[in-house]
Image (cartoon, helix red, strand yellow):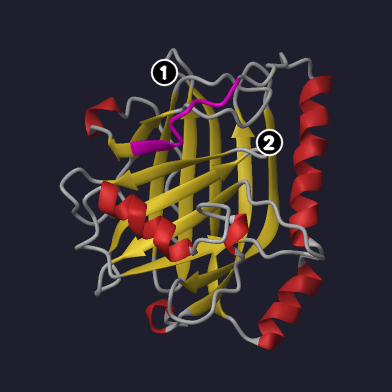
Amino acid sequence: MSLPALDLALLEGRVSHQRLFPREHSFDYGIFYRAEVLGVNGSRFKNKDHGYHDDRTLLSWATELLNAAGLSEQVSKVMLLAMPRVFGYVFNPVSFWFCLDQRNHLHAVLCEVNNTFGESHTYVCSHADQRPIVDSDWLEGEKVFHVSPFMDREGKYRFRFSFRNSRLGVLINYFDADGRLKLRTSLSGSWLADTFRNRVTLSLKYPLVTLRTIGLIHYHAARLALKKINYRPKPDQLENRLTYVQQVSAKHHSIKENPVDDQ
């Protein structure tokens, strides 16, 4: 499948998390997402589920963020990748907005993070000079949003993206306040055409995908509690809901991090 030729697509992939300390804990499971280029046809995603979370359009939200980052001239289309609603319910731990130029080079990724407390924060990943993001780039930003009650709201995230015609790879690693790699996370998968047959096949293969995701979040939270990981009460959300993520110098890569998916 040639992804750039399509305005609608599906992604079949796997999500993995590996917590390294103070107790090791990991999981890996299959998942599927929907993807669409915004503004081409009527959106299958609801405006209230993403972006402004109201009646304003998803493309207008992305455009506002790109204008603020000085990327409006480089980006010609925005593809949103998110899980579908299931029986009227949806929860996306992270929705990815891939911002591409006319040659389908990736210039920015808007990582819209949601927690189970109904809050959202967006990490705007791009280069300061607006050049395309390539597979080898690590982009670093401060962690300023409370996601898990078993993680502190401090430290840094490092992001890496591989956006290709046939496959997608996303890596998000968390480093604590002392600079120690504490959590590796990844999403990797293959693009599929958004046909009725593929939708049915994936829905049967990964039934109730959104409900299953929220169920797994609470299941693994219970396991972490049983491992006696310290619980952190939720702090008040910070007023600023955006974090700009820039490239980290290669000389800072003293720890071997997980490689981007090359399959």
Amino acid type of the residue tagged 1 in the rendering: Gly
Q: Is residue 238 left or right of residue 24?
A: left
Amino acid type of the residue tagged 2 in the rendering: Ser
Which residue has dot 2 on it? Answer: 26
Which residue has dot 1 on it? Answer: 179
> Residue at 61% across / 35% down in the picture?
18
The picture quadrant where one finds residue 108 is: bottom left
Query: Please, what secondary structure does the residue beneath circle 1 have?
Result: loop
Q: Badge 1, how many Cα within 10 Å: few under 14, some, many 20+?
A: few
Q: Is residue 237 magenta?
A: yes
Outermost residue on the left side: it is 129
Magenta range is 236-244
The reply to whether residue 250 is visible in this rendering is yes
The reply to whether residue 135 is visible in this rendering is no
Q: Nearer the viewer, residue 114 or 257?
A: 114
Looking at the rendered image, the disc whose residue lies closer to the viewer, 1 or 2, is 1
Disc 1 to disc 2: CB gap under 8 Å: no
The picture quadrant where one finds residue 24 is: top right
